[in-house]
Image: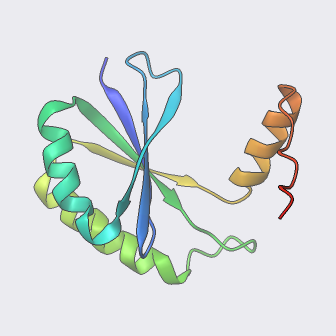
Amino acid sequence: MAKILGIDYGKVITGLSITDNEQIFAFGLDAIPTKKLMNFLKSFLSHEKIDEIVIGLPKRLNNQKETLIETDIQIFINKFRIRYPHILIKRLDERFTSKMAFNTMIELGLKKKKEEKK
């Protein structure tokens, strides 16, 4: 089974994550300057089997997709599809994902870092 690549597209920095071979767990992979993202993917995809990428879908709370970054994401997706037409692209609503991750950490018993004294 091929891995899934997660892309958290940003204007300056883009975060990448990847699943294990069984697609059960996801791990942080890297943070890449967005202007170098396509070059990174060219190298990365030449040695890693990826059948699918998941890209965050930024929406407003009222369910509208018109966020400033969405135009840039669509440009990236179009370039990616031209270069890698065999890789499936899925979008994932990213509203509340930070809150969900925080709640999961609490449920797992992980403690919030104490503020460092300055």
In the picture as drawn, the residue positioned furthest to the front comes out as 118
Report whether 84 appears left or right of 19. Answer: left
Residue ID at (75%, 71%): 61
95 or 35: nearer the eye? 35
State the quadrant of the N terminus: top left
Residue ID at (20%, 42%): 44
Report whether 69 appears left or right of 113. Answer: left
Coordinates of residue 24 in the picture (x, y in percent): 52, 20
Residue ID at (51%, 57%): 56
Total numbered labels: 0
Report whether 73 appears left or right of 64. Answer: left
Q: Quadrant of residue 106?
A: top right
Report if residue 30 is visible in the image: yes
Coordinates of residue 12 in the picture (x, y in percent): 41, 74
State the quadrant of the C terminus: bottom right
Q: Quadrant of residue 23?
A: top left
Report if residue 81 is visible in the image: no
Q: Is residue 59 above or below residue 42?
A: below
